[in-house]
Image (cartoon, coloured by chain):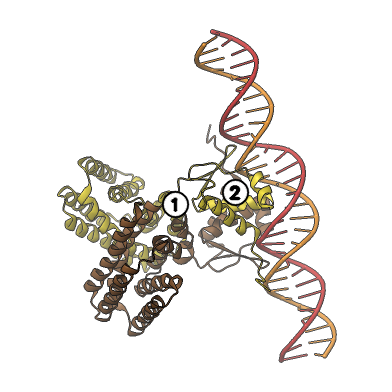
Chain colours: A brown, B yellow, C red, D orange
DNA sequence: ATTGCAGAGTGGTCGGACCACTCGGCGTGC
DNA sequence: GCACGCCGAGTGGTCCGACCACTCTGCAAT
C-alpha cells in the first residue's frame, strides 16, 4: 500500500526534536529534557537519542554540557554555519579556487558596506590589526601572519553588520584554507603586494568611499586568486 | 603537568577518521573499515565510533549505506554544504533578511557571469523553467510556484560553473526559506512584478549582457528584500 | 553569611545482543 | 552454457543495562 520504506529511528528522532524547537516547546538557550526522558517519550533507545542529539549538535542547533544537560543554541547564524569550515579542510585543491571566486563576490560588497557605515572606532580596530600584521611579517613568525590577515578581513566583514554574512565569510576563509593556500611558499614577493592592497583598502574605508573600497577589495582577492591559479598546476 | 582536560573519546575518534582521509589512507568514494574494525583499531566502543561516523555524515564527509558499509563522499562542495540548509529552517525571522542581503551580493555576480558564458542550450533550459513557472502561477497550484522560482535562479547560478557557489547559494535559498518568506501571503500584487523581473533577467542573459544581467538580478532580490522587510514587522 | 562537601542527576562510554539490509556465490532450472 | 533465484555471511541499525565523569544543588560546619 503506502510507503514501503521504513524511516530510520534516529532520523525520525532528529525530526521530532527539531519539531519541539519549531513549535516552541523549547526555545533558544533553553534546556532540553533528559536523554533518558526523550528516550522514553519517543519510545526509542537512549543510544538513538544520543545519535540524534549529536546530529543536531553538529548542525549547531543543540549544545551539550556534560553533567548539566542539553541546550538549544541561540540559533544565530554563526552557530548554524560553524560546521561548514570542513569545506576548507577536506576539499581538493581545485575547490579552493572556487572558494576564492565566491569570496570575490562577497568581500568587495561587504567592504563597500563597511565603508559606508563603519565608525571611527571600527576603523581604528581594523587598522590596529593591520599594524600587527605588518610587524609580525617583518619579524620571523610567519605562522601568526596568516591569523592577522584573516583577522583584518574578518573585522571588515563584521562591520558590515550582517551576522549571516560574517558566518558565511568565516566558513570561506578559515585558517586551514589560508594555510593550504600559502603552504610551502614563503611568498616573499607577493607579501609586499598584499600589504599594499591592505593599506589601500583601509584608506578607502577611512575616506568613507564605498566604490573605492569595493575596487580595492576586488583587486586584493583577485591577486590571491591569480597567484593561487599560477602556483596550483605543479 | 600538561593538559588537565581529557579529550572526549568520540571527538578524538572523529579526528582520527578525518586523519585517515587527510593522509589518503582512504580516498573519496572509497570504503571505510567496518565499524567493528574501527572500534578495535581505536580502542573505543562501537557506539562511540558510530557517533563519530554520524558527525562526519552530518558534515557531508561520510556516507553510510545500510548493510554495505561506510564510504567517503566525493567531497564535492555540494556534499559538504548540504547541511547548511538548517539555517533557513530554524533561524528567527530577522535572519531571513540577512540571508537575502547575502543573496543580493551573490546572485547578481553569478548572473553576470552566466550572461557571459551560458550556451544557447543553457538559456533554453532556463527559459523553460520560467515558462512552467508562469503557467503554474496562472493556474491554482501555488505550492509548485515556489519550486519553479527556485529552479529558475538555481539554474542560472549553476551555469556560472562554480560548484561551491552553487552549494552556498542553495543553502541560502532553500525551499523552506522561500516558504517562510511567502507564508500566509498570496502576494498576488507582487507576483506580476516578480515575473517581470524574471523576464528582464532572462532577456539580459540572452543579450549576453553581464551588466544588464547584474542590474536585473539586483533589482529582483532587492524587491523581495523590501517586500519582506515591509511584511515582517506585524 | 560564607564556605565546603556530599549526593543526586546528567551526559559519556562501554559491552553484548539481536534485527534489518546488502551483496556475492551457489545451485537450480531453462 | 546461461539466467534466474535463493540463501547465508557480513554490514550497519537498534536496543538494553551497566558504570564512569562531570555539574549543580542544598545542607552542614564554620
- Where residue B39 appears, as percent x and y from the top left, is 67, 48
Mark 2: which secondary structure? Answer: helix
How many neighbours does mark 1 have within 10 angstroms: few (below 14), some (14-19), or many (20 or more)?
some
Residue A24 appears left or right of B204? right
Examine the rendered structure and indicate whether residue D6 appears above or below residue A18. above
Q: Are marks 2 and 1 on the same chain?
A: no
- Where residue B105 appears, as percent x and y from the top left, is 29, 62
Residue B227 visible? The answer is no
Picture quadrant of residue B210:
bottom left
Residue B101 appears left or right of C18? left
Tell me the tag on residue A152. Answer: none
Q: Seen from this angle, which residue lies furthest left?
A: B207
Q: Which residue is mark 1?
A: B82
Q: Nearer the viewer, residue B6 or B152?
A: B6
Output the chain of dot 1. B
Residue at x 66%, y 52% (from the top left corner): B42
Examine the rendered structure and indicate whether residue A31 appears above or below residue D25. above
Residue at x 30%, y 71% (from the top left corner): A111
Picture quadrant of residue B171:
bottom left
How many neighbours does mark 2 have within 10 angstroms: few (below 14), some (14-19), or many (20 or more)?
some
Q: Nearer the viewer, residue B219 or B163?
A: B163
Q: Nearer the viewer, residue B62 or A186?
A: A186
Q: Which residue is mark 2?
A: A10
Give the Cα distance between marks 2 and 1.
19 Å
- Where residue A112 appears, as percent x and y from the top left, is 27, 71
Output the chain of dot 2. A
Residue C18 appears left or right of B128? right
Amino acid at each position: 500500500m503506502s510507503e514501503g520504506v521504513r524511516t530510520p529511528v534516529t532520523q525520525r528522532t532528529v525530526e521530532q526534536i527539531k519539531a519541539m524547537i519549531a513549535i516552541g516547546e523549547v526555545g533558544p538557550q533553553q534546556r532540553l529534557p533528559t536523554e533518558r526522558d526523550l528516550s522514553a517519550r519517543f519510545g526509542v533507545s537512549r543510544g538513538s537519542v544520543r545519535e540524534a542529539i549529536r546530529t543536531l549538535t553538529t548542525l549547531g542547533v543543540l549544545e551539550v554540557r556534560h553533567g548539566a544537560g542539553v541546550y538549544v543554541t541561540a540559533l544565530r547564524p554563526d552557530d548554524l554555519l560553524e560546521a561548514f569550515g570542513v569545506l576548507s579542510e577536506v576539499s581538493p585543491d581545485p575547490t579552493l579556487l572556487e572558494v576564492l571566486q565566491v569570496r570575490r563576490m562577497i568581500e568587495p560588497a561587504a567592504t563597500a558596506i563597511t565603508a559606508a557605515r563603519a565608525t571611527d572606532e571600527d576603523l581604528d580596530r581594523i587598522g590596529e590589526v593591520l599594524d600587527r600584521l605588518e610587524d609580525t611579517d617583518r619579524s620571523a613568525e610567519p605562522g601568526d601572519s596568516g591569523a592577522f590577515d584573516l583577522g583584518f578581513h574578518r573585522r571588515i566583514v563584521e562591520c558590515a553588520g550582517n551576522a549571516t554574512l560574517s558566518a558565511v565569510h568565516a566558513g570561506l576563509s578559515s585558517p586551514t584554507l589560508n594555510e593550504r593556500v600559502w603552504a610551502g611558499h614563503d611568498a616573499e614577493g607577493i607579501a609586499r603586494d598584499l600589504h599594499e592592497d591592505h593599506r589601500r583598502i583601509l584608506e578607502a574605508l577611512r575616506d568613507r568611499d564605498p566604490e573605492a573600497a569595493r575596487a580595492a577589495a576586488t583587486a586584493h582577492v583577485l591577486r590571491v586568486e591569480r597567484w593561487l591559479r599560477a602556483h596550483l598546476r605543479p
